[in-house]
Amino acid sequence: MAGGFSVAAPAGVQFEAKITPLVIISCIMAATGGLMFGYDVGISGGVTSMDDFLIKFFPAVYRKKHADKESNYCKYDNQGLQLFTSSLYLAGLTATFFASYTTRNLGRRLTMLIAGVFFIVGVIFNGAAQNLAMLIVGRILLGCGVGFANQAVPLFLSEIAPTRIRGGLNILFQLNITIGILFANLINYGAAKIHPWGWRLSLSLAGVPAVLLTLGALFVTDTPNSLIERGRLEEGKTVLRKIRGVENVEPEFNEIVEASRIAHEVKHPFRNLLMRRNRPQLVIAVLLQIFQQFTGINAIMFYAPVLFNTLGFNSDASLYSAVITGAVNVLSTLVSVYSVDKVGRRLLLLEAGVQMFLSQALVAVFLGIKVTDNSDNLSNGWAILVVVLICTFISSFAWSWGPLGWLIPSETFPLETRSAGQSVTVCVNLLFTFVIAQSFLSMLCHMKYGIFAFFAGWVIIMSIFVLFLLPETKNVPIEEMTERVWKQHWYWKRFMDDDEQAFNGDTEKNGRISPNGKNGV
Ligand code: BGC
């Protein structure tokens, strides 16, 4: 996910700044939040395909899995099993609301610390689970951690880093998520061979990024923006000097103070968000999240081993196929880092639309021909073909909808609605992640191979949306979005004609937007 839930770096003034060791260490520490999230995304699928785990918590699923007469597609159809995966996202989206408050009032550092503590307690519950309740409580606690971390970490990163590396950091967060998913797949591959407690190892190792994040949050300093926002001006200035490695921080300091003043003046950010002139950004942010999830990516991220198992791969093959898809995910995200500001957002999304559609449609056709309800396994050649198609699907997602689903909303909202817009974006994303997690295995059971046709259909819809309604935002300074993007767009420009009255005076003051992406989420 979450793909850099970051506030994009406005172009514009560059302040004096060195990339100091303090900045590097802080960023590494904070980025463990991305690893943690990715690990949680990737771990559940492998664990739910392990027999030891099923025998202990889901004996009914275990029996079904090994019953000959059971339809291949329905082996794992179980609401409790899906709840094990999905509860995390439900908790996460609820926590986002509280996280929005703590990031603003207690600071980014303390919010990361809260996240770390939730993660650690959640991991303990999961690793030591004796029954389903402990397992679900653990996932809920992890979800709370995700809600807090995903709000605070990207903001921390975007505020602590000098402007010129801020864009890269945005995608770094997404990259960390994919690395977390890959780690989880690798660990599952090894842990599945340890009987009967391999699954405990898988769930417990989430403790490593959790402890790192917590230690990081104890030792890093809060961002100057957060300190200043909470009225600690002198402290903010001292920290700014330390992290920038230069004496003269006056211009940047003044900008932050000014941005903070403006942010304080916006009394109702959520109401502002609903104004007519903010409609295009809101609609786009919400739809991008829904579309991102309806590509079907998490059906694979969560359930790849289960899915491969369903298709007749043995357990080992299922788990290492998941390692392959995880690696493709990481490598393809790198493609995005290099190309997003060169070829632009639209081209990446449109190319990916074609590639995703073809991969999914072909998977649907092959499975339709090859996997009948109670048939035996796919033959080797077909199995390899399915894995290759799933990899082509994942790679196109990873250089398009993965990072861009997060980048585009973060760079299009104006300052006065950026924080509220960010919360809505995170929430809608987690909501639809939950929907997919909770329903995929049942959908697979009922729709069979048609599930891939279903997602392929959504890919057509989202590509048409991109073609006609998503403007290009490449290389457009954030403070010039309204003039250069929205007012020029054939459709969205009609929402831009009521500038003056819409802002009850805020617009003029907000002519200057902090190059710190300061927004007081
Ligand atoms: C999505 C996650 C997904 C991940 C896969 C993110 O952008 O938001 O839901 O699991 O990409 O890499």
Image (spheres, rainbow, N blue to C red):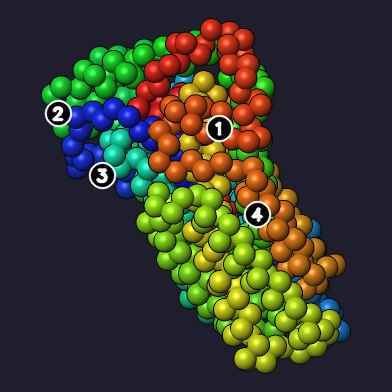
User: Can you tell which of label 1 and label 2 is closer to the viewer?
Assistant: 1
Q: Please determine whether, in this image, residue 2 is positioned above or below residue 179.
A: above
For mark 4, give the secondary structure: helix
Q: Which residue lies under the disc numbered 3?
A: 24
First of labels 3, 2 by sequence position? 3
Q: Which mark is residue 246?
A: 2
The residue drawn where x is 50% and y is 75% is: 324
First of labels 2, 4 by sequence position? 2
Crowding at mark 3 (Cα within 10 Å: few <14, some 14-19, many 20+): some
Q: Is residue 80 rendered to the left or right of residue 241?
A: right
Q: What amino acid is found at the position of numbered circle 1 in the picture?
A: Gln
User: Can you tell which of label 3 and label 2 is closer to the viewer?
Assistant: 2
The percent coordinates of residue 104 (x first, y second) are: 47, 23
Tell me the CA gap for discs 3 and 2: 16 Å
Crowding at mark 2 (Cα within 10 Å: few <14, some 14-19, many 20+): few
- Kindly check if marks 3 and 4 are in contact, taking CB atoms under 8 A apart as contact: no
Tell me the CA gap for discs 4 and 1: 21 Å
Q: Which residue lies under the disc numbered 1?
A: 488
Give the image quadrant in which the ligand numbered 1 is located: bottom right
* Res 474 visible: yes
Q: What amino acid is found at the position of numbered circle 4 in the picture?
A: Ser
